[in-house]
Image (spheres, helix red, strand yellow):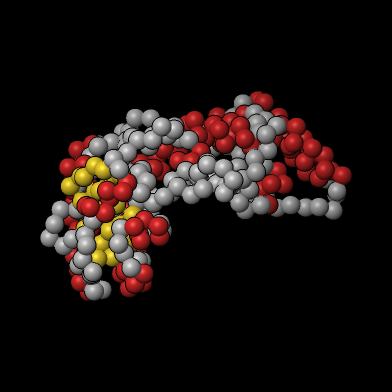
């Protein structure tokens, strides 16, 4: 999906974003007793101890605060007065390769050191006893020379979390673009829901197609709930056939005492304007009302 974002604006606001982050980190680090910080990018988590499959990477949020790069076991290093440094563990394996970034606007703002051998990461990290580590991977933290008192120190982490609450113009630009793309998916699903009898899985896949995303790229797994499933707030066990919806409808008719109040997000027959509805959707709306009256 091609982004309509003005790349010149993206580049300019990102540079300002990095300058603001650098100034804030330079203020926070000495106030909490540190002179440098190493932010781990994240590590894929094993799906099972009995197999070598891993869940998709969920990056450390403080790493993503600095740059939009999906990379495992890398580090963002910041020292006050120095250019932020990315120590990029970019060794390609036989089985998998990381996805390339969507744009390259962030590279010039960073001092990039590529590392092909993960055991060499430590050579490019600060050795000061007053440097801190932020991240989840305790194995890497230990291998990189950090002691327990310098791993996710509470005072520093609290200050960095406060910075994430504030949104810079760059982040607002990214949020607007994310919402634009999500809107394409929601419009596609609403239209399909109104026009046809699709399964939950089909609607979920329509959203992914319209937003040009894989399932793992969504911020959260999509909640697609039809019929009585709408009573479950986080329903993600998608029904795979239209027959399941018919079975659910019959079950409700067989249990006249059961009344489920469904969220009023979208219901069959609701439409922005009468002129946009088809005769078929109007007939479905009338049939739905008759069934409710008979229940």
Instruction: Residue 240: give x, y in percent of width and height.
Output: 67, 34
Name which residue lies at 35% across and 49% down. Answer: 73
- Residue 237 is left or right of residue 139, and the answer is right
Q: Please say if 107 is above or below 3.
A: below
Front one among 222 and 33 = 33
- In the displayed orientation, state which residue is furthest to the top: 279
Name which residue lies at 41% across and 50% down. Answer: 43
Q: Please say if 210 is above or below 263.
A: above
Residue 150 appearing in the image: yes
Instruction: Residue 279: give x, y in percent of width and height.
Output: 65, 25
Front one among 219 and 225 = 219
Answer with the quarter of the image where residue 145 lies.
bottom left
Instruction: Residue 42: give x, y in percent of width and height.
Output: 39, 51
- Residue 60 is left or right of residue 28, and the answer is right
- In the displayed orientation, state which residue is furthest to the left: 81
Residue 64 appearing in the image: no
């Amino acid at each position: 999906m091609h982004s309509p974002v003005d790349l010149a604006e993206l580049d300019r606001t990102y540079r300002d974003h990095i300058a603001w982050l650098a100034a804030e980190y330079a203020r926070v680090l000495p106030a909490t007793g540190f002179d440098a910080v190493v932010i781990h990018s994240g590590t894929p988590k094993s799906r099972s101890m009995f197999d070598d499959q891993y869940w998709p990477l969920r990056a450390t949020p403080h790493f993503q605060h600095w740059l939009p790069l999906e990379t495992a076991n890398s580090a963002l290093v910041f020292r006050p007065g120095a250019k932020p440094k990315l120590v990029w563990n970019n060794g390609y394996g036989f089985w998998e390769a990381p996805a390339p970034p969507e744009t390259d606007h962030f590279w010039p703002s960073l001092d990039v050191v590529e590392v092909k051998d993960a055991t060499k990461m430590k050579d490019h990290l600060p050795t000061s006893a007053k440097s801190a580590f932020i991240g989840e991977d305790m194995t890497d933290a230990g291998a990189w020379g950090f002691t327990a008192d310098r791993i996710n120190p509470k005072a520093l982490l609290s200050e960095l979390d406060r910075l994430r609450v504030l949104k810079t113009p760059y982040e607002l630009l990214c949020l607007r673009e994310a919402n634009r793309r999500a809107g394409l998916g929601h419009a596609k699903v609403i239209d399909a829901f109104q026009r046809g009898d699709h399964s939950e899985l089909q609607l979920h896949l329509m959203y992914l197609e319209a937003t040009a995303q894989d399932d793992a790229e969504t911020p959260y797994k999509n909640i697609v709930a039809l019929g009585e499933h709408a009573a479950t707030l986080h329903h993600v066990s998608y029904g795979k056939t239209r027959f399941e919806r018919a079975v659910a409808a019959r079950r409700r008719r067989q249990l006249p005492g059961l009344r489920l109040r469904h969220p009023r997000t979208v219901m069959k027959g609701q439409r922005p304007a009468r002129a946009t509805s088809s005769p078929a959707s109007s007939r479905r709306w009338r049939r739905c009302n008759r069934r409710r009256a008979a229940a």
